[in-house]
Image (spheres, rainbow, N blue to C red):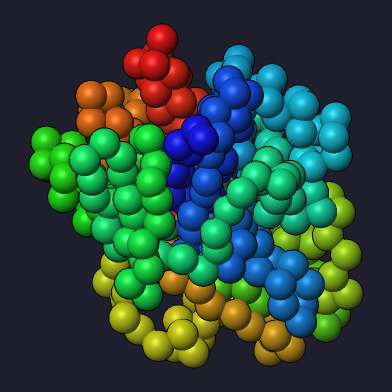
Amino acid sequence: MTVPIAIIGTGIAGLSAAQALQAAGHSIHLFDKSRGSGGRMSSKRSDAGALDMGAQYFTARDRRFAAAVQQWQAEGHVAEWKPLLYNYHGGTLSLSPDEQVRWVGAPRMSAITRAMLGDMPVTFSCRITEVFRGERHWNLLDADGQSHGPFSQVVIAIPAPQATTLLADAPKLASVVAGVKMEPTWAVALAFDSPLDTPLEGCFVQDSSIDWLARNRSKPGRDSQMDTWILHATSAWSRQHVDMPKEEVIDQLHGAFAELMNCAIPAPAFTLAHRWLYARPAGGREVGALSDADLGLYVCGDWCLSGRVEGAWLSGQEAARRLLEHLK
Ligand code: FAD
Ligand code: NAI
């Protein structure tokens, strides 16, 4: 019997690694603490339709990632989003068009990771708390005290602060990963029964508690009856208000939204807040992935590259490449 490779995390980094390893003929098993795949690229089902609370869109600047996006587009899992873009600066909203191609999952962001996962073996609602080495193989322990294994290698594809705690058997890797700090982001969704009187569909915001807002319904394939909006707070505001109750966060960001929009903002019919504790890496890091090939441990995620969807996918590819290289 072949001993499979364990992959912790079904965000786009873990799934990117999983696809590359499967394509090379290896058997893998994925684990995720959530009930579904996608991580920060997942969408929230709600009474106002599916809402992209995390990643809003992505760009493809690397040739290899662009090829993957093209394939997802051909399969109908992604579509181009062409928002009417604005910029808010110094108290003024102004049109800010550009030539950048921006992609979104269709009909919701989570469609991409759902398609990548396909029928790969996976255990959801399983938070891994320990990764430990037996005589020849690796085993995983979950938060319910259940053990999983044996595994020949382990790929850890989760945010750095969460990965650090799983690296007790690899102190050198642990000390590098522990040096990576990640910033939180508060995300709020507002839904209105009647459409707001504005053509704006996306806005980069400066000088506010908000740094980005988007009309969720303007993305291709979204079928909400309501006019749905996503607001993202800045890292600084999110850090300062990290423990604020959700109702208060909604109030504050709704207020900031009303202040910067040039139209009447009625009371929303629906609201939702989500706190991403590890939303984005603080400071740039371009390591591709981290590994101790002799031990059989690989670590990847957006924080190893650009802190974006593209970087996460490339980091998963790099972890798989290193693992396959070692087995040659
Ligand atoms: P994740 O998506 O975080 O995946 C990690 C997975 O591991 C999760 O599913 C988690 O449940 C699981 N996990 C964690 N710990 C454990 C454990 N102990 N055991 C088991 N499972 C575990 N990027 C862009 O390119 N464009 C954007 O517009 C954009 N906007 C963003 C807005 C917000 C609010 C946020 C939060 C992120 C945004 N990003 C954006 C960043 C983008 O979402 C990430 O770079 C990318 O999704 C990260 O993928 P990943 O696989 O590295 O990590
Ligand atoms: P991109 O090229 O569209 O944007 C990069 C940055 O350039 C923007 O943040 C913005 O500051 C600026 N910009 C781009 N187009 C603009 C325009 N038309 N008008 C004014 N400013 C413009 O996309 P890229 O490089 O793929 O980045 C992804 C986005 O994801 C970024 O906006 C980033 O801030 C966001 N992100 C948010 C996270 C969060 O936690 N809130 C985490 C990770 C990424």
Residue 59 location, quadrant? top right
Q: In the displayed structure, would residue 26 be above or below residue 202?
A: above
Front in this rendered view, residue 193 or 306: 306
Which residue occupies 40% across, 65% down?
Answer: 127
Q: Position of residue 76 (x, y in %)?
A: 85, 39
Q: In the displayed structure, would residue 292 be above or below residue 325?
A: below
Using residue 69 as the reference point, say whether residue 174 is left or right of it. left
Which residue occupies 76% across, 25% down?
Answer: 70
Q: In the displayed structure, would residue 3 be above or below residue 186?
A: above
Q: In the displayed structure, would residue 276 be above or below residue 20?
A: below
Front in this rendered view, residue 49 or 176: 176
Q: Position of residue 24 (x, y in %)?
A: 58, 20
Front in this rendered view, residue 179 or 32: 32
Location of the C terminus by quadrant is top left
Which residue occupies 44% across, 18% down?
Answer: 324
Using residue 261 as the reference point, say whether residue 292 is left or right of it. left
Which residue occupies 71% across, 47% down?
Answer: 119
* Count of numbered badges drawn on the protein: 0
